[in-house]
Amino acid sequence: MKFLSALLIIQLCIATSTQAQWQPVPNIPAEPILALYSEGNDLYAAGTNRIYHSMDGGANWSPSALIHQDGDEVTDLAVVDGIIYAAMIQDGCYISTDGGKNWKKNNAGLSGLGATNLSALAVRGDKIYVATIGAGVFVKPLANPLAPWAPFNTNIPWGNVQSLIADGNQLLAGAGANATLSRNTASSATWSEHSFDRFNGQINLFLGATRSGQVLLGAGSQGLYRSTDDGINWTYFNPGVGLMERVRFANWQGQVVALLTKPNGSFLRSTSDAGQTWSAFPLAPPKNGIGFDLLAQGGKLFYAASNGLWSLSATVAAREPKEPEISLGQSFPNPTVDGFTLIPFSLYKSQNVSLAVIDLQGRVIRQLGLGRLPAGPHAFTIDLNGVAAGMYTYVLRSEDELQAQRMMVH
C-alpha cells in the first residue's frame, strides 16, 4: 500500500464541511492529483504515474502515456516550451518532448545517496533545477533537455531538500529540518544558509514560498512567514493548524491563498495584506480529500487532491475541518542512515497510541504498541535493520484518529 493509499484510508475517518461551490474537473478521474503547472493557457495536472493536459484553460483534458511501467509517484512537474519534466519519488526524472506520448528517463548525472528520490523542480532563466531527498540540488540547461544533470550544492550543508522555489533571479531551497533555508542568486555558484525561525528542537522544514508584491511569503512545518528583504530575515505567523508537511500558494483575486496539508486533513488560509495577517479562506477544501497543490488560472482556483482535481469560481463562508487531537512529525533522519529512525509526534490529550511501519504492498513490517501516553510531545526510535531499501509509510493510531507519513529506508 502506497503512502497515498494510507491517506485515503485516513480521510474516511475525517469529516469536513460540504462544499457545493467546489466543482470536480471533468475528464479527470477521482484519483490522486499530486502537482499542477501552467504554461500560457495550457494546464498540466500530475496523477501518480501520468500527466493530464488541457489546452483550453481546464475545460477539457487528455491523459499522457504512463510515465513508466514499474509504478511510482510524481512529486513535481515543470513544462518549458511544451517539454514536460516529471520528478518521481523513487525513479528520478522523466522527460517527454512530444506532449506525453513517450517518456525518457533522464537520470544521467544524478549521483549519490537519494539522488533519484526527487522532491521538487524549479525553472530559473535558461536552466532547470531538481531537488533530491539525500543528494542536494542538481542543474542542467533547458536548451538540451536530455543533457546530464550536474551537482549544484556548494555550501548547502544538507542533502535532504524538501522544496525548491524560483523567486525571480534567486532560488530558495528547503534544505535540512532545523528552521533553515538555503539561498542562491543567479550571479553566484554558491548557496548561503539563513534561518527563517528560531530552532526549538522540533522539526521545521522550509516548505514553500511565493511573492505578494515586494514581500516574500514562506511556509515552514510550524507556520507561515514573511520576509521584506528577499528571504534573509523572516517574521512568523501561526495559522493555527499545528505541524504541516506540505504547503502550496496561489495568487488569486487579489489575495494569496495557502494550502496547508497534514496527514489527516488540509486547510486553506488567505491574506490580503502581504502576510501580516492570515485568516481562514471563506470556503473550506472539498470534503473527503487531502490537498496537494493549488493553481490560479483564468479566474479559477484549481485544487489538486487525493480524490481528483477541483475548481472554484466563487467563495462562500464555510466551516474549517475539526482540529486533530494527534500530530505526527517527519521521521529523522530521512532517509535512514544506520538502520534506526526517530519518529516524533504530539498528543493533545492523554490516550492510547500505537506506531506501525507499512511497506508498499500494505504489509506491516514493524509495530509498537505504546499504551497510554500523556499529552505533549513524544518520540520513539524504531529499528529498521534488515528492512529492504525503499519507500515506507509509518502510521500513528490513537483511540479516535489515524495519521501517516512517508519515509525512505536506505
Image (cartoon, rainbow, N blue to C red):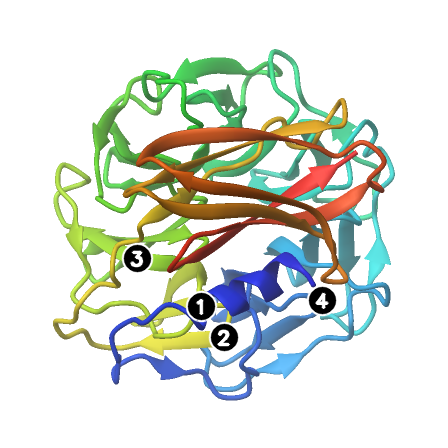
Looking at the rendered structure, the secondary structure element under dot 3 is: strand
The mark closer to the camera, 3 or 4, is 3
The numbered mark at residue 267 is 3
Question: Which residue has dot 2 on it?
Answer: 307
Question: Which residue appears at 47% of the width and 38% of the height?
Answer: 329
Image quadrant in which you'd find residue 386:
top right
Q: Give yes or no for contact between labels 2 and 1 (Cβ–Cβ under 8 Å).
A: yes
Residue 152 pos. (x, y %): 68, 23
Question: Which residue has dot 1 on it?
Answer: 11
Quarter of the C terminus within the rendering: top right
Q: What amino acid type should be assigned to the residue bearing mark 1?
A: Gln
Question: Which residue appears at 72% of the width and 62% of the height?
Answer: 362
Looking at the rendered structure, the secondary structure element under dot 4 is: loop
Marked residue nearer the N-terminal end (1 or 4): 1
Packing grade of label 1 (10 A; few <14, some 14-19, many >=20) is many
Quarter of the N terminus within the rendering: bottom right
Give the camera-side residue of 86 and 386: 386
Marked residue nearer the N-terminal end (4 or 2): 4
Q: Is residue 230 above or below residue 407?
A: above
Question: Which residue has dot 4 on it?
Answer: 49
Q: Give yes or no for contact between labels 3 and 4 (Cβ–Cβ under 8 Å).
A: no
Q: Give yes or no for contact between labels 1 and 3 (Cβ–Cβ under 8 Å).
A: no
Left or right: 266 as drawn, with respect to 6: left
Q: What amino acid type should be assigned to the residue bearing mark 3?
A: Phe
How much space separates mark 4 and mark 2, taking CA atoms? 15 Å
The answer to whether residue 141 of the structure is visible from this angle is no
How much space separates mark 1 and mark 4, taking CA atoms? 22 Å
Question: Which residue appears at 70% of the width and 70% of the height?
Answer: 50
Looking at the rendered structure, the secondary structure element under dot 1 is: helix
The mark closer to the camera, 1 or 3, is 1
